Amino acid sequence: MAIRNDFELTDKKGSGDANGHINEGFVPDGEAKGGKQPSKEANASSSYKLDVEIGEERATWGNPVEFLMSCISMSVGLGNIWRFPFTAYENGGGAFLIPYLVVLYFIGKPLYFLEMAMGQFSSYGSVKIWEVAPIVKGIGYGQAFATWCVVTYYTSLMALVSFYFIASFQDPLPWAYCDPAWADEKCADSSMNLTNSSMFGKSESPTDQYFRRNVLQQIENIDDGIGAPEWRLTLCLFFSWIVIFLILAKGVSSSGKAAYFTALFPYFVLITLLVRGVTLPGAYEGIMFYITPQWDKILEAKVWYAAVTQCFFSLSVSFGPIVMFSSYNNFKQPIYRDSLIISFMDTGTSLLAGVTIFAILGHLAHELDVDITKVVKGGTGLAFISYPEAIAKMAFVPQLFAVLFFLMLFTLGVGSASSLTGCVITVINDDFPQWKRWKITAVVAVIGFCCGLVYVTPGGQYILDLVDYFGGGFIIFIMAILETFAISWIYGYKNLIRDIHFMIGTKLSFYWVVEWGFFIPVTLLAIFVYSLFKYEPLKIGDSYMPTSATTAGWILTLIAVSQIPIWAFIAVRKQTGKTIFEKIRNACKPTKEWGPKNPNTHQEWLKYCKENETEVSNKSWKFYKRWTQKPYVINE
């Protein structure tokens, strides 16, 4: 049940806001329909009141370490171990590494800190946070849609991992040799003498064929459809959603505890695989391919585009979970320190995974006597080929390492998928706080399972590539541009820096103004526009995806982007004003819900803003041009 708290602040001239709302253009539904209006006497009193609606107290982490571990589990996840290696592989290895590190430092880390600050300051999720500027609330819904797209295929990856985990108990490992039940004439065990083979230079490893021909039962193209869901993978998908439901049903009280294991256990297995990988014959050539820049490719737009999207996936920037996790923090949590720790661990993990993968790819190239760029077909299945290959060659109980590895990969999947799913649940819970969280979680899990069935079909990996490119990459790119622009230029970067100073006591330097206000939005926009000019349809091997599939991808993007004008129209329509321009200006102003959620802290914040002659008042607000960075000032 909601509780009203009234705070009295003395006003020099005693002119109160006409409707008790920070945004003078806002009219509650009851008043818009002829409800009771504040009396003139109340407006002329020597003091005015700020009415703050406070719902049920928001849950918080058990301790700051749980928050840190949850963020590490979210950021250091499938994006690092699964997605980073195949993205680097498809974009030239070392040619990708330099753009990735540049983007990570100058775009990824500042955005991570920005989202942590906004979430902690407001205690809202990724949609409700846009009370800061209702006209761009559609950004939150667009991000939530992209997050949901990614969740649906992340859980399908967890299904694949579950399948491999069960298979890891077999002796010998089923992908260590060519089984006639699924292998064809191209399959070549490492023990075979390929010198006299007619397939010399055209061989495929058993790990490759096991994944494509046995696990996925993959078809060559999707011109005639994607087929029916594979029953074994369907059961694994169902199990994955059961695990996510159990973790999220009780909110941060349960997910925070699970984060200790999901954040730390993967490092043990990854380091073990690294040690084994670098000792394999041919590993040196693979690592050199990974760290040697190809300067001619660095100027290609697609490499920079891939670097930005991978940065977003690695850190989970612009998806919403960072805002969501931070919203459960204590108000004074030192998030700048936390953001540095998390981003450095994320970078280190990606680089570590890259060395491991490319060491194994170098070994596969040595074994099959092919160029490293032709070892495997790349794509989303790379991690299910390279890592198992290294495990199969371990002399001491490879089954043990296989079990540990796929347990690690499942753990990473749980960390990534549960954080993304939790973001979607928080969006719903913030809009409908009266609904029980476990019921929302159950409904989301059922819908997610149904959506995920498309990925466990024989053509499912092609759909995964499509959704990853459009649903994850394109949409998040657009939302990141709009997010930084909206916060820096509609709310105002001076307002933002002031709020962060009030919250954590740190006065940010001019560097952050340049980053958030200029460099990030301009750079992202330039890369995105250039990539559109150089756009090429997605390929399946050497052929392009069907037009129908590409069209479906663009429709996904359109659904997300259309949220911007739809919610802008709704926000403007709710405002009062004599002209459309006045309504638009009012829709750009924060609502009274914006600010620290705790009533005492909210009062202190208002006093702090007034004392510093800045932008926020619970009274009448005056609109200035955005570039003056004084959009909200107290009427004297």
Image (tube, rainbow, N blue to C red):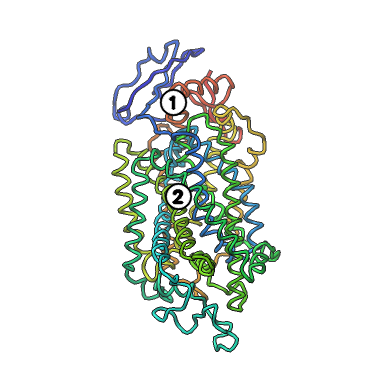
- N-term mark: 1 or 2: 2
> What's under tag 1, amino acid-wise?
Asn
> What's under tag 2, amino acid-wise?
Gly
Report the front residue among 487 and 287: 287
Observer-side mark, 1 or 2, equals 2
User: Mark 2 sits on what residue?
Assistant: 415
Taking the spot 48% from the left edge, 30% from the top edge, the residue there is 330
Give percent across and percent down for residue 258. Answer: 42, 44
Report the front residue among 337 and 406: 406
Q: Is residue 519 above or below residue 55?
A: below
Taking the spot 44% from the left edge, 80% from the top edge, the residue there is 183
Q: Quadrant of residue 169?
A: bottom left
Residue 233 is at least partly visible in this image? yes
Q: Residue furthest right?
A: 295
Q: Residue furthest front?
A: 396
Could you tell whether 36 is left or right of 395 in the image? left
Report the front residue among 104 and 369: 369
Query: CA gap, disc 1 to disc 2?
Result: 29 Å
Could you tell whether 32 is left or right of 490 in the image? left
User: Mark 1 sits on what residue?
Assistant: 598
Q: Is residue 478 above or below residue 165?
A: above
* SS state under label 1: loop
Q: Is residue 322 above or below residue 297?
A: above
Q: Quadrant of residue 91?
A: bottom right
Q: Which mark is residue 151?
A: none
Could you tell whether 570 is left or right of 194 in the image? left
Taking the spot 64% from the left edge, 58% from the top edge, the residue there is 97
